[in-house]
Image: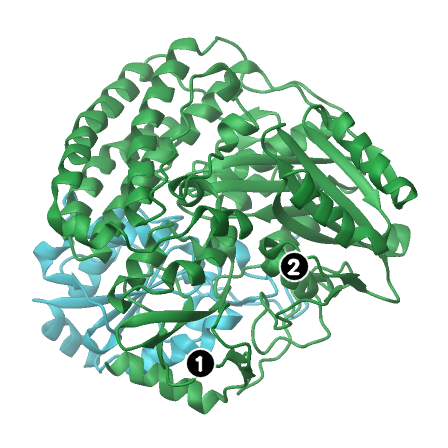
Chain colours: A cyan, B green
Amino acid sequence: MFKKLCQKAFSKSLWVYHVNVGACNGCDIEVIDVLTPYYDAERFGIKLVASPRHADVLLVCGPVTRQVVPAVKRLYDAVPDPKLVIAIGSCAVGGGIWFDSYNIVGGVDAILPVDYHIPGCPPRPEAILHGIAVALGLAEKQVAPVHLKQLPDRPESVSIKTPV
Amino acid sequence: MSAQQLGETVKQRFGDKVLDLSAPDLGQLYLTITPDSVVPVAEYLYKDLGCRFVVNSGTDRRRERGKFLITHFFTQDEEKIYIAVHTEVDEDHPQIDSITPTVPAANWSERETRDMIGVVPVGHPDPRRLVVADDWPEDLFPLRWDVEHGTKPPPVEGVAMPRLDPPEGASVVPIGPYFPVLEEPTYFRVCGEGEEGGGVDHRGFYNHRGVEKLGCSVLTYNQVPFIAERICGICGFVHSSSYCQAVELAAGLEVPERVEYIRTIMLELERIESHSLWLGIAGHIIGFDTILMQTWRMREPLMWLCERISGNRKTYGMNLIGGVRRDIEPEMYDDILEVIGNIEREWQALYDAIPGDGTLMARLQGTGVLPTEVARELGAAGPTARGSGLAIDVRIDHPYAAYDRLDVKKCVYDGCDNLARVLVRLDETLDAINIIRQALRDMPEGPIMAEFDEEIPAGREAMNAVEAPRGEVFHWVLTGTENRPERWRVRAPTYANLQNVPPMLKGNALADVPICIGSFDPCFSCTERMEVVDVNSGRVRVYTQEEMLAETQGHSES
């Protein structure tokens, strides 16, 4: 029901607030790119706002670093309900190449409930537009999440083995 | 003076204190000195020989030598020499004399070395932590070899970094960690009286991702360029080029000439892209969105061009040790020329319009003044330094890739204000277009990968710097076993430039603070984190989390 309400409420105007939680800037500049003349997200009523208190949607880029966690949680609380969180870029989706680094907590869903994921490194402006259009109910989802099970005999901690 | 001669000069002056001296490559000098002579040698290099401090680095060599290796990097721009001053510190007494009182630019990197390796700079004026998170344990140093790269200590609530106390009667304006004009999280506390800004305290490094640790413990030589590009999504090619060139120098690899030209072209395309992006953001910061829309419109065909050349709009993924992955096909030359030709035409129009615009001039002229002397002392780099009259440009001072064969201009202005920094970038963009034309004209045919089959020997080292759009990017690689660097040190230009913020903000109206910070094109993901520096008073007060919360809350409501 909440989803329906959101889709109805947001379909005409969506105010977004952009949050960098440790990104390399690649996704951030593509987010701004979406608002500039070639892609022009404002034609869908999407507007970048300067305060989380004005926002409907948080666009979150980057792997969550240890240092930003309290600030981002406060920021999320400052956004009025109903609100959406869109994770933009591979790092925000699951931690990306930094996933097991000492200062990284993980993807955005490690600390906030994420409604939509837009993968890519960085995602193309078209992909970001598509993701937002899905959120607005203007376009269909193209992929569905697959749940993978952790086998019982594997150790808890994941270590990456890289070819030499 | 050659590097060898410079080394001899230092050796003559300090005698037995210089334990070892080598100058393996043109323009690189490695000195090993005793721990008690760190400060005198630094002072001699900095004051008497006119060297500029770059960064310092700590390496954990307890396994091989039972010691920590601390290295101070300097550069002598006129003689085109990079200098590494190694000192070995005993593992039982991890302490070294701080050079910050003598060389102010070393402030941050000495603190970073303490955070990462645990070697304490004795006599440092600001003993607070810099890089690691507030709740990171005091006795855990991520870059030591026995600390796993995936170590994640449990979070602790209610820990905050001590903040500097504002002077009597001043009010504090907190900016950040989330603030609309800053794309990335960073936290400034500007103390002001009335409308005028005074001291600044800064807490950064919200974007610290542990790049160096991953490069030295998990990845292999050829995987590091991938992660190096993601140090910064705007100037990523700069980092991967600098890393690859450092490894090539260390291993003694000859790179085909065509590779050097391809790297040069991609670096200059990236410069145009970055400067037009920056100009747009600067326009946005001062409330002139027309500039944002125009420059980003001009920039977009360049993004498409880069996608055609490299396969990605950003983070090109072209660099490998010894060469590049993709060639620039001769059919593409005309496309490149057409795109940069269009940008040149429109850029020229913009160039002519800016000095005539009263609004822009009012916001830029005379604001954010960074005097030449201060810029030199605090180690400013790139357009920030050149806007303050310091004629340093790595492309000319320490040529790499194909720059020694091309005609490159140093764009220097001595206005020292925000306008000067804008003009430097406007000029550089036109110059970059010119460089690409020359490079396309002169580029020879040939292979795009050096042939080598032996392993890269361990224990070699090399320094390399590249002129990023924001300034000097510096990489130092110490080769190791297991097909990966033993230590890989990165210094991004914003690391040096951010330390120039406090003097720049002094005496400015609070409304000009964002453009001052924006004027050196800060890139916090490069720098990896933040913190506050100077204040009028030297007292330190510890803020509780409630006080901090109250401040931030007040800010987000306002």
Residue at 68% x, 62% y is B116
- Is B278 displayed left or right of B86 in the figure? left
Asked if B84 appears above or below A144 in the picture, the reply is above
Whether marks 2 and 1 lie on the same chain? yes
Nearest to N terminus: mark 2 or mark 1: 2
- Is B541 displayed left or right of B309 in the figure? right
Residue at 42% x, 39% y is B389
Q: Where is residue B249 drawn, in percent x and y? A: 68, 28
Identity of the amino acid at label 1? Pro
- Is B379 displayed left or right of A91 in the figure? right
| Residue nearest the viewer, comparing B27 with B136 | B27
Q: The C terminus of chain B lies in which quarter of the figure?
A: bottom left
Which chain does the residue under circle 2 lie in?
A: B
Asked if B357 appears above or below B317 in the picture, the reply is below
**Mark identifier at residue B167:** 1
Q: On the image, which quarter does residue B162 sit in?
A: bottom right
| Residue nearest the viewer, comparing A21 with B455 | A21
Q: The N terminus of chain B lies in which quarter of the figure?
A: top right
> Label 1: few (<14), some or many (≥20) within 10 Å?
some
Q: On the image, which quarter does residue B301 sit in?
A: top left
**Closer to the camera: disc 2 or disc 1?**
1
Find numbered disc 1 in the image and state the secondary structure of the residue it sits on: loop
Q: Where is residue A6 drawn, in percent x and y? A: 17, 75
Mark 2 → mark 1, Cα distance in angstroms: 24 Å
Residue at 53% x, 71% y is A66
Find numbered disc 2 in the image and state the secondary structure of the residue it sits on: loop
Q: Where is residue B176 drawn, in percent x and y? A: 36, 71
Identity of the amino acid at label 2? Thr
Which chain does the residue under circle 1 lie in?
A: B
Determine which residue is flagged by label 2. Answer: B100
